[in-house]
C-alpha cells in the first residue's frame, strides 16, 4: 500500500526461468545393405542369384558335352581298328573252305606203297595234282596271317577306347582264334610238303624196284647191274627225307625193306658174276624174304599215324575258325 493510502497494484513478476523445449529426436539412420537375408532383397540380389544358377547349369552342360565327346571320340578311335579287323577276319573266313578241303584230303589214300604192282606214274600224277591244290591255298594262308598280325596290335585297350572295350575285346578274341587256326593250317601245309617230297622219292624208288624186277625176271644180268645205282640212290634219298615227326616212323619198315632188298640184289648180282652157287642160293632166299616183308607192311599203321599227325591240326583249325567267324 502507498503512503497516500491509495491502493497500488504492482505488476506481477515474470517467472524466474522458462524451461527449455524438449529436443527433437535424432533422425532415423539410413537403411544400408547388410549381411542378413534382407540384404539380398531387391533387383540386385535377384540378379546375383540368377547368375549363379546359370553358372551351375553351364558347368553341368559342359560336363555332359565332355562325356558325349569322350564316348563319340572313343567310338571313332576304336572304329578304324575294329573295321580293319573285321575286314581281315572276313577274308580269312572266305578262304576257310579251300583250306579245310586241303587238310581233310588224304593224298596217299588207296596208294599201297609196298605193292609190286603200284602204278607209279598214276600215283605221282595224283600227288602232283594234290600239291597243286596246296600251292594254291598256301598264299592265302600266309596273306591272311600277315593281315591279322597287322591289325592285332591295334586291338589294345586304352583310356580313349574304354567305351568300345567290349567290341575291341570281342574282335581281339576273334583275331587271336583266327591266327591260331592259320598256324594250325600252316603247320599242316608244312608237313604235307615234307611228306610229298618223301613220298615222291619213295615212288621213284618203287619205280626203280619194278624196273629191277623186270630185268631180273628176264635174267638180264647187265641190265640188273645197271639198275642198281639208281635204285640205291632213290632209296637213300627217300630215307634222308623220312625225318620224324613230319614223316611218321610208320613209314620206316618200307624204307628198311627197300634198303635190304637193294643190298640183297647187289649181293645176288655179285654172286652170279662170281658164279658162286652157295651165295646165289643165299641171296635168292633173302630176296624172297624181302618180298614177303614188304608185302606184309601194315598200311593201317601208316594211316593211323597220319591221322594222329593231322587230326589235331584239323580239329584246331575248325574249332578256332568257328570262333573267328563269330560263333
Image: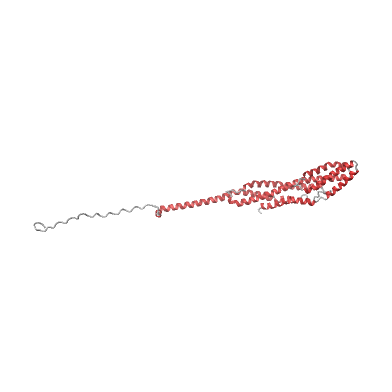
Question: Is residue 256 something that shows in the picture?
Answer: yes
| Residue 11 x/y as whole percent | 15, 56
Residue nearest the observer in this picture, 27 or 291: 291
Where does residue 324 sit, x and y in percent of width and height? 66, 51
Q: Quadrant of the N terminus?
A: bottom left
Query: Can the viewer see residue 117?
Result: no
> What colour scheme was applied to this rendering of the protein?
secondary structure
The single residue placed furthest to the left in the displayed view is 4
Quarter of the figure that contains the C terminus: bottom right
Please tell me in which quadrant of the rendered image residue 280 appears.
Answer: top right
Left or right, residue 85 beside residue 19:
right
Q: Residue 233's quadrant in the figure?
A: top right
Residue sitting at x 86%, y 48%? 289
Measuring from the top left, give residue 94's x and y in whole percent: 68, 50
| Camera-nearest residue between 178 and 95 | 178
Left/right placement of residue 324 relative to residue 25 reads right
Q: How many marks?
A: 0
Amino acid at each position: 500500500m502507498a503512503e497516500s493510502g491509495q491502493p497500488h497494484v504492482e505488476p506481477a513478476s515474470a517467472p524466474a526461468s522458462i524451461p527449455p523445449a524438449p529436443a527433437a529426436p535424432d533422425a532415423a539412420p539410413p537403411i544400408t545393405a547388410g549381411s542378413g537375408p534382407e540384404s539380398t532383397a531387391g533387383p540386385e540380389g535377384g540378379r546375383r542369384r540368377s547368375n549363379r544358377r546359370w553358372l551351375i547349369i553351364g558347368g553341368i552342360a559342359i560336363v555332359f558335352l565332355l562325356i558325349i565327346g569322350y564316348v563319340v571320340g572313343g567310338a571313332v578311335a576304336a572304329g578304324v581298328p575294329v573295321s580293319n579287323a573285321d575286314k581281315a577276319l572276313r577274308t580269312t573266313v572266305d578262304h576257310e573252305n579251300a583250306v579245310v578241303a586241303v587238310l581233310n584230303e588224304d593224298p596217299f589214300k588207296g596208294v599201297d606203297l609196298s605193292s609190286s604192282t603200284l602204278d607209279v606214274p598214276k600215283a605221282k600224277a595224283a600227288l602232283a595234282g594234290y600239291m597243286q591244290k596246296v600251292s594254291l591255298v598256301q598264299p592265302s594262308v600266309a596273306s591272311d596271317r600277315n593281315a591279322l598280325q597287322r591289325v592285332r596290335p591295334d586291338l589294345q585297350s586304352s583310356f580313349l577306347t574304354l567305351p568300345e572295350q567290349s567290341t575291341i575285346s570281342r574282335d581281339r578274341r576273334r583275331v587271336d582264334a583266327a591266327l591260331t587256326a592259320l598256324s594250325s593250317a600252316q603247320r599242316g601245309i608244312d608237313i604235307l610238303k615234307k611228306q610229298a617230297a618223301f613220298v615222291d622219292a619213295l615212288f621213284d624208288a618203287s619205280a626203280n624196284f619194278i624196273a629191277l624186277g623186270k630185268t631180273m625176271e628176264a635174267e638180264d644180268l647187265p641190265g640188273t647191274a645197271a639198275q642198281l645205282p639208281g635204285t640205291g640212290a632213290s632209296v637213300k634219298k627217300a630215307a634222308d627225307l623220312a625225318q620224324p615227326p613230319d614223316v611218321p616212323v610208320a613209314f620206316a619198315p618200307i624204307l628198311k625193306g627197300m634198303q635190304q632188298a637193294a643190298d640183297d640184289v647187289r649181293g645176288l648180282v655179285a654172286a652170279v658174276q662170281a658164279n658162286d652157287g652157295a651165295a646165289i642160293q643165299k641171296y635168292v632166299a633173302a630176296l624172297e624174304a624181302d618180298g614177303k616183308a614188304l608185302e606184309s607192311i601194315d598200311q593201317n599203321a601208316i594211316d593211323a599215324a597220319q591221322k594222329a599227325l593231322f587230326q589235331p591240326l584239323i580239329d584246331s583249325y575248325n574249332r578256332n575258325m568257328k570262333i573267328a567267324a563269330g560263333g
